Image (spheres, rainbow, N blue to C red):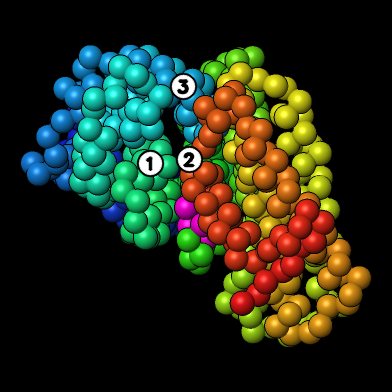
Amino acid sequence: MGQLIAPGLDDGLIPTQVTLYILQYVQCSFSGDDYIAVLTFRLKAFPDDHLDAHPAYYPKDTISGAVASCQAELMEMYFEHVHPVFAILGPQRPSSISSSLTLRASIYALALQHCPTARDIDPWIFTDFNKQALNIERQAPKLETIEAALLFAQRHAHVLRAPTMPGMSAEIGSIVGMAHDLGLNMDPVHWDISEHEKRRRRRLWWGVFMLDKCLRNALTLGRPSFLVDHQSNHSQPTLSDFAEDCSSTPPPKDRNAALQFIAMAGLTRILSKIMTYYFSVQSDLEDVDSLDTMPAFSKFEEELEHWSTQSLAPLLAEKAFPDPTGSLEIAYYTTQVTLYRGVLRELTSRSSPTDQFWEYLSQQSKTVALSVINLLEYLPVARSSTFWWAIADEFGSFKTQLLHRWKFYDQDVLVLNFD
Protein backbone atom coordinates (compact mmCIF):
# COMPACT_ATOMS: atom_id res chain seq x y z
CA MET A 1 0.00 0.00 0.00
CA GLY A 2 1.54 3.32 -1.03
CA GLN A 3 0.78 6.81 0.18
CA LEU A 4 1.69 9.80 -1.96
CA ILE A 5 2.36 12.96 0.02
CA ALA A 6 3.05 16.28 -1.67
CA PRO A 7 2.43 18.89 1.02
CA GLY A 8 1.44 22.39 0.08
CA LEU A 9 0.36 21.55 -3.46
CA ASP A 10 -2.76 23.00 -4.98
CA ASP A 11 -4.25 20.34 -7.29
CA GLY A 12 -5.24 22.99 -9.77
CA LEU A 13 -1.64 24.16 -9.96
CA ILE A 14 -0.13 20.89 -11.12
CA PRO A 15 -1.16 20.72 -14.81
CA THR A 16 -0.12 24.26 -15.73
CA GLN A 17 2.62 25.57 -13.45
CA VAL A 18 4.36 22.58 -11.95
CA THR A 19 6.53 20.60 -14.34
CA LEU A 20 9.00 18.78 -12.10
CA TYR A 21 8.75 16.60 -9.00
CA ILE A 22 11.84 15.84 -6.97
CA LEU A 23 11.80 12.74 -4.77
CA GLN A 24 12.78 13.89 -1.28
CA TYR A 25 12.77 10.53 0.46
CA VAL A 26 11.27 7.06 0.49
CA GLN A 27 10.36 5.61 3.86
CA CYS A 28 9.67 1.89 4.19
CA SER A 29 8.28 0.13 7.25
CA PHE A 30 7.14 -3.44 7.89
CA SER A 31 4.29 -4.71 10.04
CA GLY A 32 3.10 -8.14 11.08
CA ASP A 33 4.40 -11.57 10.34
CA ASP A 34 3.47 -11.32 6.69
CA TYR A 35 5.86 -8.37 6.17
CA ILE A 36 3.36 -6.08 4.50
CA ALA A 37 5.40 -3.09 3.36
CA VAL A 38 4.06 0.42 3.80
CA LEU A 39 5.83 2.88 1.54
CA THR A 40 5.67 6.62 2.00
CA PHE A 41 6.89 8.77 -0.86
CA ARG A 42 7.44 12.44 -0.23
CA LEU A 43 7.61 14.54 -3.36
CA LYS A 44 8.36 18.19 -3.71
CA ALA A 45 7.11 20.13 -6.72
CA PHE A 46 8.99 22.98 -8.31
CA PRO A 47 7.92 25.32 -11.12
CA ASP A 48 10.02 25.56 -14.28
CA ASP A 49 11.57 28.89 -13.41
CA HIS A 50 13.26 27.36 -10.35
CA LEU A 51 15.38 25.31 -12.76
CA ASP A 52 16.71 28.34 -14.64
CA ALA A 53 15.56 26.72 -17.88
CA HIS A 54 14.92 30.18 -19.39
CA PRO A 55 16.64 32.72 -17.09
CA ALA A 56 16.83 36.44 -17.72
CA TYR A 57 20.09 36.05 -19.65
CA TYR A 58 18.54 33.60 -22.14
CA PRO A 59 19.28 35.10 -25.58
CA LYS A 60 16.64 37.28 -27.19
CA ASP A 61 14.66 35.81 -30.06
CA THR A 62 16.51 36.83 -33.21
CA ILE A 63 15.22 33.84 -35.16
CA SER A 64 11.53 34.55 -35.70
CA GLY A 65 12.13 37.96 -37.23
CA ALA A 66 14.93 36.73 -39.49
CA VAL A 67 12.77 34.00 -41.08
CA ALA A 68 9.42 35.81 -40.99
CA SER A 69 9.15 36.07 -44.77
CA CYS A 70 10.20 32.49 -45.57
CA GLN A 71 9.46 30.36 -42.51
CA ALA A 72 7.03 28.07 -44.34
CA GLU A 73 9.45 27.56 -47.24
CA LEU A 74 12.31 26.69 -44.87
CA MET A 75 10.19 24.10 -43.10
CA GLU A 76 9.13 22.64 -46.44
CA MET A 77 12.73 22.41 -47.64
CA TYR A 78 13.81 20.75 -44.41
CA PHE A 79 11.25 17.98 -44.77
CA GLU A 80 12.02 17.58 -48.47
CA HIS A 81 15.83 17.50 -48.37
CA VAL A 82 17.04 16.90 -44.80
CA HIS A 83 14.40 14.78 -43.09
CA PRO A 84 14.67 11.88 -45.61
CA VAL A 85 18.30 11.25 -44.62
CA PHE A 86 17.98 11.79 -40.86
CA ALA A 87 14.37 11.19 -39.82
CA ILE A 88 14.93 12.05 -36.17
CA LEU A 89 11.60 13.92 -36.05
CA GLY A 90 9.67 10.83 -37.11
CA PRO A 91 6.10 11.45 -38.28
CA GLN A 92 6.08 15.13 -37.27
CA ARG A 93 4.99 17.71 -39.81
CA PRO A 94 5.71 21.44 -40.04
CA SER A 95 2.43 22.19 -38.28
CA SER A 96 3.29 19.94 -35.33
CA ILE A 97 6.90 21.04 -34.75
CA SER A 98 7.55 22.30 -31.24
CA SER A 99 7.73 26.05 -30.72
CA SER A 100 11.21 25.56 -29.21
CA LEU A 101 13.42 28.26 -30.70
CA THR A 102 16.54 26.09 -30.55
CA LEU A 103 14.82 23.30 -32.49
CA ARG A 104 13.48 25.69 -35.09
CA ALA A 105 16.86 27.41 -35.42
CA SER A 106 18.48 24.03 -36.10
CA ILE A 107 15.85 23.18 -38.71
CA TYR A 108 16.17 26.54 -40.47
CA ALA A 109 19.97 26.32 -40.49
CA LEU A 110 19.94 22.94 -42.25
CA ALA A 111 17.24 23.98 -44.72
CA LEU A 112 18.81 27.32 -45.60
CA GLN A 113 20.93 26.18 -48.54
CA HIS A 114 17.92 24.46 -50.14
CA CYS A 115 15.64 27.51 -49.93
CA PRO A 116 16.14 30.17 -52.66
CA THR A 117 13.89 32.68 -50.87
CA ALA A 118 16.12 32.53 -47.77
CA ARG A 119 19.50 33.04 -49.44
CA ASP A 120 19.90 36.53 -47.98
CA ILE A 121 19.62 35.31 -44.37
CA ASP A 122 22.91 35.30 -42.48
CA PRO A 123 23.52 31.65 -41.41
CA TRP A 124 25.46 32.82 -38.37
CA ILE A 125 22.19 34.02 -36.81
CA PHE A 126 21.18 30.42 -36.13
CA THR A 127 24.64 29.34 -35.00
CA ASP A 128 25.11 32.25 -32.61
CA PHE A 129 21.66 31.83 -31.07
CA ASN A 130 21.91 28.08 -30.53
CA LYS A 131 25.41 28.20 -29.10
CA GLN A 132 24.08 30.45 -26.36
CA ALA A 133 20.61 28.99 -25.88
CA LEU A 134 21.52 25.29 -25.88
CA ASN A 135 24.20 25.89 -23.25
CA ILE A 136 21.44 27.17 -20.98
CA GLU A 137 18.76 24.63 -21.92
CA ARG A 138 21.02 21.67 -21.23
CA GLN A 139 20.75 22.48 -17.51
CA ALA A 140 17.16 21.20 -17.64
CA PRO A 141 16.84 19.38 -20.99
CA LYS A 142 13.63 18.22 -22.58
CA LEU A 143 13.14 15.93 -25.56
CA GLU A 144 12.98 18.89 -27.93
CA THR A 145 16.34 20.02 -26.51
CA ILE A 146 17.87 16.72 -27.66
CA GLU A 147 16.21 17.09 -31.07
CA ALA A 148 17.58 20.61 -31.41
CA ALA A 149 21.08 19.58 -30.31
CA LEU A 150 21.21 16.57 -32.63
CA LEU A 151 20.21 18.64 -35.64
CA PHE A 152 22.49 21.52 -34.64
CA ALA A 153 25.43 19.11 -34.55
CA GLN A 154 24.80 18.40 -38.27
CA ARG A 155 25.28 22.09 -39.16
CA HIS A 156 27.43 23.18 -42.05
CA ALA A 157 30.87 24.65 -41.45
CA HIS A 158 30.71 28.28 -42.60
CA VAL A 159 34.47 28.78 -42.29
CA LEU A 160 37.03 26.49 -43.91
CA ARG A 161 39.66 25.84 -41.27
CA ALA A 162 41.40 23.09 -39.36
CA PRO A 163 39.93 21.76 -37.19
CA THR A 164 36.70 22.25 -39.11
CA MET A 165 34.49 22.58 -36.04
CA PRO A 166 36.54 23.09 -32.89
CA GLY A 167 34.83 21.91 -29.73
CA MET A 168 32.58 19.41 -31.51
CA SER A 169 33.68 16.47 -29.35
CA ALA A 170 32.83 18.39 -26.17
CA GLU A 171 29.49 19.37 -27.71
CA ILE A 172 28.69 15.72 -28.38
CA GLY A 173 29.66 14.86 -24.81
CA SER A 174 27.07 17.32 -23.54
CA ILE A 175 24.41 15.77 -25.80
CA VAL A 176 25.22 12.33 -24.40
CA GLY A 177 24.98 13.78 -20.89
CA MET A 178 21.54 15.24 -21.62
CA ALA A 179 20.43 11.91 -23.07
CA HIS A 180 21.44 10.16 -19.86
CA ASP A 181 19.72 12.83 -17.76
CA LEU A 182 16.50 12.01 -19.60
CA GLY A 183 17.03 8.25 -19.38
CA LEU A 184 17.16 7.82 -23.15
CA ASN A 185 19.60 4.93 -22.83
CA MET A 186 16.79 2.82 -21.34
CA ASP A 187 14.23 1.23 -23.65
CA PRO A 188 10.86 2.67 -22.50
CA VAL A 189 8.84 -0.28 -23.79
CA HIS A 190 7.44 -1.06 -20.31
CA TRP A 191 7.15 2.53 -19.10
CA ASP A 192 3.78 4.05 -18.28
CA ILE A 193 3.99 6.78 -20.90
CA SER A 194 2.25 7.33 -24.22
CA GLU A 195 3.26 5.29 -27.25
CA HIS A 196 4.07 8.57 -28.98
CA GLU A 197 6.71 9.44 -26.38
CA LYS A 198 8.13 5.90 -26.36
CA ARG A 199 8.73 6.09 -30.10
CA ARG A 200 10.18 9.56 -29.84
CA ARG A 201 12.58 8.46 -27.12
CA ARG A 202 13.78 5.49 -29.17
CA ARG A 203 14.44 7.65 -32.21
CA LEU A 204 16.36 10.16 -30.13
CA TRP A 205 18.50 7.49 -28.49
CA TRP A 206 19.52 6.08 -31.84
CA GLY A 207 20.24 9.59 -33.10
CA VAL A 208 22.57 10.14 -30.15
CA PHE A 209 24.18 6.73 -30.73
CA MET A 210 24.88 7.48 -34.39
CA LEU A 211 26.20 10.95 -33.61
CA ASP A 212 28.66 9.63 -31.03
CA LYS A 213 29.84 6.50 -32.82
CA CYS A 214 29.94 7.60 -36.41
CA LEU A 215 28.85 11.02 -37.54
CA ARG A 216 30.87 13.49 -35.55
CA ASN A 217 32.98 11.88 -32.85
CA ALA A 218 34.52 8.42 -32.62
CA LEU A 219 35.04 7.75 -36.33
CA THR A 220 35.23 11.25 -37.77
CA LEU A 221 37.29 12.91 -35.03
CA GLY A 222 39.06 9.81 -33.74
CA ARG A 223 37.92 10.52 -30.18
CA PRO A 224 36.98 7.85 -27.62
CA SER A 225 33.27 7.15 -27.70
CA PHE A 226 31.21 8.64 -24.88
CA LEU A 227 28.75 5.74 -24.98
CA VAL A 228 29.39 2.27 -23.58
CA ASP A 229 27.31 -0.31 -25.41
CA HIS A 230 26.40 -2.38 -22.35
CA GLN A 231 24.84 0.66 -20.64
CA SER A 232 21.86 0.60 -23.00
CA ASN A 233 19.14 -1.99 -23.55
CA HIS A 234 17.62 -0.68 -26.77
CA SER A 235 16.82 -3.06 -29.60
CA GLN A 236 17.11 -2.07 -33.26
CA PRO A 237 14.59 0.65 -34.25
CA THR A 238 11.60 -0.51 -36.26
CA LEU A 239 9.13 1.04 -38.69
CA SER A 240 6.64 1.49 -35.86
CA ASP A 241 9.00 4.04 -34.27
CA PHE A 242 8.28 6.33 -37.23
CA ALA A 243 4.54 5.76 -37.39
CA GLU A 244 1.83 8.22 -36.49
CA ASP A 245 -0.25 7.70 -33.36
CA CYS A 246 -2.59 4.69 -33.49
CA SER A 247 -0.59 3.14 -36.34
CA SER A 248 2.21 0.59 -36.52
CA THR A 249 3.68 1.65 -39.88
CA PRO A 250 4.64 5.06 -41.24
CA PRO A 251 2.76 6.60 -44.18
CA PRO A 252 4.06 5.42 -47.58
CA LYS A 253 5.76 8.76 -48.25
CA ASP A 254 7.76 8.41 -45.00
CA ARG A 255 8.65 4.75 -45.32
CA ASN A 256 11.99 5.21 -47.11
CA ALA A 257 13.11 7.85 -44.61
CA ALA A 258 12.35 5.43 -41.78
CA LEU A 259 14.17 2.58 -43.52
CA GLN A 260 17.16 4.86 -44.13
CA PHE A 261 17.35 5.72 -40.41
CA ILE A 262 16.95 2.07 -39.39
CA ALA A 263 19.65 0.99 -41.84
CA MET A 264 22.06 3.65 -40.57
CA ALA A 265 21.44 2.54 -36.98
CA GLY A 266 22.27 -1.06 -37.91
CA LEU A 267 25.43 -0.04 -39.77
CA THR A 268 26.54 2.10 -36.83
CA ARG A 269 26.21 -0.88 -34.47
CA ILE A 270 28.59 -2.84 -36.69
CA LEU A 271 30.96 0.12 -36.93
CA SER A 272 30.94 0.50 -33.14
CA LYS A 273 32.09 -3.10 -32.71
CA ILE A 274 34.82 -2.65 -35.33
CA MET A 275 36.08 0.52 -33.64
CA THR A 276 36.11 -1.16 -30.23
CA TYR A 277 37.94 -4.24 -31.50
CA TYR A 278 40.62 -2.54 -33.60
CA PHE A 279 40.98 1.06 -32.42
CA SER A 280 40.41 1.17 -28.65
CA VAL A 281 43.24 1.81 -26.18
CA GLN A 282 42.83 -1.67 -24.73
CA SER A 283 43.04 -3.33 -28.14
CA ASP A 284 46.54 -1.88 -28.57
CA LEU A 285 47.67 -3.67 -25.41
CA GLU A 286 46.51 -7.12 -26.48
CA ASP A 287 48.78 -9.55 -28.30
CA VAL A 288 47.01 -10.85 -31.38
CA ASP A 289 48.55 -12.88 -34.18
CA SER A 290 47.23 -13.38 -37.69
CA LEU A 291 45.49 -16.64 -36.76
CA ASP A 292 43.51 -14.93 -34.00
CA THR A 293 42.45 -11.94 -36.06
CA MET A 294 41.07 -13.89 -39.01
CA PRO A 295 37.86 -15.13 -37.27
CA ALA A 296 37.00 -11.62 -36.05
CA PHE A 297 37.71 -10.11 -39.47
CA SER A 298 35.58 -12.74 -41.20
CA LYS A 299 32.73 -12.16 -38.74
CA PHE A 300 32.74 -8.40 -39.35
CA GLU A 301 32.83 -8.94 -43.10
CA GLU A 302 29.85 -11.29 -42.87
CA GLU A 303 27.91 -8.75 -40.80
CA LEU A 304 28.61 -6.02 -43.34
CA GLU A 305 27.63 -8.26 -46.23
CA HIS A 306 24.40 -9.23 -44.48
CA TRP A 307 23.64 -5.57 -43.76
CA SER A 308 24.29 -4.63 -47.38
CA THR A 309 21.96 -7.36 -48.64
CA GLN A 310 19.16 -6.78 -46.15
CA SER A 311 19.26 -3.00 -45.69
CA LEU A 312 21.19 -1.19 -48.42
CA ALA A 313 20.25 -3.17 -51.53
CA PRO A 314 16.45 -2.81 -51.10
CA LEU A 315 16.80 0.96 -50.64
CA LEU A 316 19.04 1.29 -53.70
CA ALA A 317 16.43 -0.56 -55.73
CA GLU A 318 13.71 1.96 -54.83
CA LYS A 319 15.08 4.76 -57.07
CA ALA A 320 13.22 7.41 -55.10
CA PHE A 321 13.26 11.14 -55.83
CA PRO A 322 14.88 12.75 -54.00
CA ASP A 323 17.08 9.75 -53.28
CA PRO A 324 18.82 9.84 -49.86
CA THR A 325 20.79 6.63 -50.33
CA GLY A 326 24.02 8.27 -51.51
CA SER A 327 24.97 9.11 -47.94
CA LEU A 328 24.13 5.61 -46.76
CA GLU A 329 26.26 4.05 -49.49
CA ILE A 330 29.18 6.32 -48.58
CA ALA A 331 28.78 5.30 -44.94
CA TYR A 332 28.91 1.63 -45.97
CA TYR A 333 32.16 2.12 -47.90
CA THR A 334 33.60 4.09 -45.00
CA THR A 335 32.82 1.25 -42.61
CA GLN A 336 34.51 -1.22 -44.96
CA VAL A 337 37.61 0.97 -45.10
CA THR A 338 37.61 1.24 -41.32
CA LEU A 339 37.59 -2.55 -41.07
CA TYR A 340 40.45 -2.97 -43.57
CA ARG A 341 42.50 -0.25 -41.89
CA GLY A 342 41.94 -1.90 -38.54
CA VAL A 343 43.02 -5.38 -39.55
CA LEU A 344 46.03 -4.14 -41.54
CA ARG A 345 47.09 -1.92 -38.66
CA GLU A 346 46.83 -4.86 -36.29
CA LEU A 347 48.69 -7.32 -38.49
CA THR A 348 51.51 -5.06 -39.66
CA SER A 349 52.28 -3.97 -36.11
CA ARG A 350 52.34 -7.46 -34.58
CA SER A 351 52.93 -10.05 -37.27
CA SER A 352 53.41 -10.59 -40.97
CA PRO A 353 50.20 -11.36 -42.84
CA THR A 354 50.31 -14.15 -45.37
CA ASP A 355 50.73 -13.22 -49.01
CA GLN A 356 47.27 -14.62 -49.75
CA PHE A 357 45.58 -12.57 -47.04
CA TRP A 358 47.53 -9.45 -48.03
CA GLU A 359 46.47 -9.90 -51.64
CA TYR A 360 42.84 -10.33 -50.57
CA LEU A 361 42.86 -7.15 -48.47
CA SER A 362 44.58 -5.20 -51.25
CA GLN A 363 41.98 -6.33 -53.77
CA GLN A 364 39.08 -5.53 -51.45
CA SER A 365 40.52 -2.11 -50.70
CA LYS A 366 40.88 -1.39 -54.40
CA THR A 367 37.29 -2.47 -55.00
CA VAL A 368 36.00 -0.09 -52.34
CA ALA A 369 38.10 2.80 -53.66
CA LEU A 370 36.83 2.28 -57.20
CA SER A 371 33.25 2.01 -55.91
CA VAL A 372 33.54 5.41 -54.25
CA ILE A 373 35.08 6.99 -57.34
CA ASN A 374 32.32 5.54 -59.49
CA LEU A 375 29.62 6.67 -57.06
CA LEU A 376 30.82 10.28 -57.02
CA GLU A 377 31.56 10.43 -60.73
CA TYR A 378 28.02 9.45 -61.65
CA LEU A 379 26.14 10.93 -58.68
CA PRO A 380 22.80 12.19 -60.07
CA VAL A 381 20.97 15.26 -58.82
CA ALA A 382 18.34 13.05 -57.18
CA ARG A 383 21.01 11.75 -54.79
CA SER A 384 23.24 14.80 -54.37
CA SER A 385 20.32 17.04 -53.35
CA THR A 386 19.73 15.00 -50.19
CA PHE A 387 23.29 14.28 -49.11
CA TRP A 388 23.56 14.02 -45.33
CA TRP A 389 26.15 16.67 -44.54
CA ALA A 390 27.59 14.88 -41.54
CA ILE A 391 28.24 11.86 -43.76
CA ALA A 392 29.73 14.13 -46.41
CA ASP A 393 32.16 15.51 -43.83
CA GLU A 394 32.94 11.97 -42.81
CA PHE A 395 33.67 11.21 -46.46
CA GLY A 396 36.21 14.05 -46.46
CA SER A 397 38.08 12.18 -43.75
CA PHE A 398 37.57 8.95 -45.67
CA LYS A 399 38.96 10.49 -48.86
CA THR A 400 42.03 11.66 -46.96
CA GLN A 401 42.56 8.09 -45.78
CA LEU A 402 42.41 6.90 -49.39
CA LEU A 403 44.96 9.43 -50.56
CA HIS A 404 47.28 8.70 -47.67
CA ARG A 405 47.03 4.92 -47.62
CA TRP A 406 46.47 3.93 -51.23
CA LYS A 407 48.23 4.91 -54.40
CA PHE A 408 47.13 3.87 -57.88
CA TYR A 409 50.01 3.48 -60.29
CA ASP A 410 47.58 2.40 -63.01
CA GLN A 411 44.05 1.05 -63.18
CA ASP A 412 45.10 -2.41 -62.14
CA VAL A 413 47.74 -1.85 -59.49
CA LEU A 414 47.00 -0.66 -55.97
CA VAL A 415 49.79 -0.04 -53.48
CA LEU A 416 49.04 0.39 -49.78
CA ASN A 417 51.15 3.06 -48.16
CA PHE A 418 51.69 3.04 -44.38
CA ASP A 419 54.06 5.99 -44.05
For the residues bearing labels 2 and 1, Cβ distance under 8 angstroms:
yes
Residue at 23%, 27% in the rendered image? 121
Q: Between 113 and 405, which is closer to the camera in this rendering? A: 405
Q: Which residue is drawn at 76% across and 57% down?
A: 410
Q: Is residue 219 magenta?
A: yes
Circles 3 and 2: CB distance less than 8 Å? no
Among numbered discs 1 and 3, the one appearing first in the sequence? 3
x and y percentages locating residue 382 in the rendered image = 59, 23
- Residue 11 relative to residue 342: left or right: left
Camera sees residue 131:
yes
The stretch of residues the image draws in magenta is 215-220
Tag on residue 389? 2
Q: Which residue is drawn at 47% across and 52% down?
A: 216
Task: Between residue 32 and residue 2, name the one nearer to us.
Answer: 2
- Picture coordinates of residue 131 (x, y %)? 25, 46
| Quarter of the rendering containing residue 101 | top left
Q: Which amino acid is tagged 1?
A: Arg
Is 276 colored magenta in this rendering?
no
Q: What residue type is labelled 2?
A: Trp
Q: Nearer the viewer, mark 3 or mark 2?
A: 2
| Cα–Cα gap, marks 1 and 3 | 16 Å
Amino acid at pointer 3: Phe
Measured as percent of width and height from the top left, residue 60 is found at: 12, 34
In this view, 415 is above or below 190: below
| Real-space CA distance between mark 3 and mark 2, rounded to the nearest whole angstrom | 15 Å
Percent across and percent down for residue 177 are 39, 55
Mark 2 or mark 1, which has the lower sequence index? 1
Can you name the residue that lies furthest to the front here? 410
User: From this viewpoint, is residue 192 visible?
Assistant: no
40 or 224, which is in the foreground? 224
Left or right? Give the position of 77 relative to 101.
Answer: right
Q: Circle 3 sits on which residue?
A: 79
